[in-house]
Amino acid sequence: MSRERLLLYLALAGVLVFFYVSASSAPVVSDRRLGYIGGHTWLLSVEEGLARAQAERKPVLVYFWAVWCQYCKRYDNEVFPGAMVGPRLERDFVRVLIDLDADRRTPARFGVQYPPTLVFLEPGGGVVTRINGYVGAEALADTMDKVKAGVRPPEMVGNQTVVDAGRPPPPGGEP
């Protein structure tokens, strides 16, 4: 086998490996109504999510992500499928997935500027709280439990709590 042919085969193998790794690391969003990330099925429309939330009497988790977002990959591969968060996602929340690169209107509606951002909504559409950036499974599970229980947890940027002076405290509780 000539040296040129060997280099050609190696280059082709490299290209195939690149495409395989790229395809396997990106989440699969396979149809117009549903997305599949972290072992869960997500709706792709906030309106559809709110309709389902009202019917099921559950809060909504809107996950704003992007394919290029490294922290999104951590949510997708570690946090969402994990034992601490996964069952809560399935049991307690209507899940909505918004790709920041494909949908510009929905992020603007919620003031989302970068991924990952998690916005928790009441079934009627009001924002309960949000997490801007990445938090680990324990912090996310804690926030999910509070939202499910009807408690308004503080907004977070990463693992840091944000004091939001503009948000009124919930009735009978602290902000």
Image: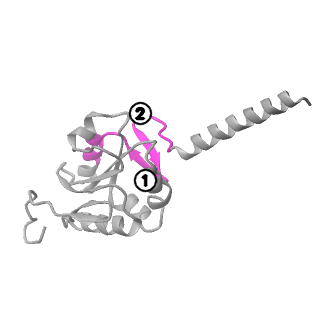
Q: Give the amino acid type for the residue marked by disc 2 in the picture.
A: Arg
> Marks 1 and 2: CB-CB under 8 Å?
no
Question: Crowdedness of circle 1 by 10 Å Cα count: few (<14), some, many (20+)?
Answer: some
Specify the segment rendered in magenta. 27-52
Residue 139 in percent (x, y) is at 34, 68
Disc 2 designates what residue? 32
Please give the residue where the numbered disc 1 appears in the rendered image. 71
Q: Quadrant of residue 149?
A: bottom left
Q: Position of residue 11 (x, y in %)?
A: 73, 33
* Outermost residue toward the right in this view: 1
Mark 2 element type: loop
Q: Nearer the viewer, residue 169 or 58?
A: 169
Q: Amino acid at mark 1?
A: Tyr
Q: Residue at x 14, y 60 (%)?
A: 164
- 53 or 113: nearer the viewer: 113
Residue 155 in which image quadrant: bottom left
- Provide residue 50's location: percent of width, then percent of height: 25, 46
Q: Residues within 10 Å of mark 2 (few under 14, many from 20)?
A: few
Q: Residue at x 9, y 65 (%)?
A: 169
Image quadrant holding the N terminus, namely top right
The tag earlier along the polypeptide, 1 or 2, is 2
Q: Quadrant of the C terminus?
A: bottom left
- Number of the front mark, 1 or 2: 1
Which of the pair 34/120 is nearer the observer?
120
Image mark count: 2
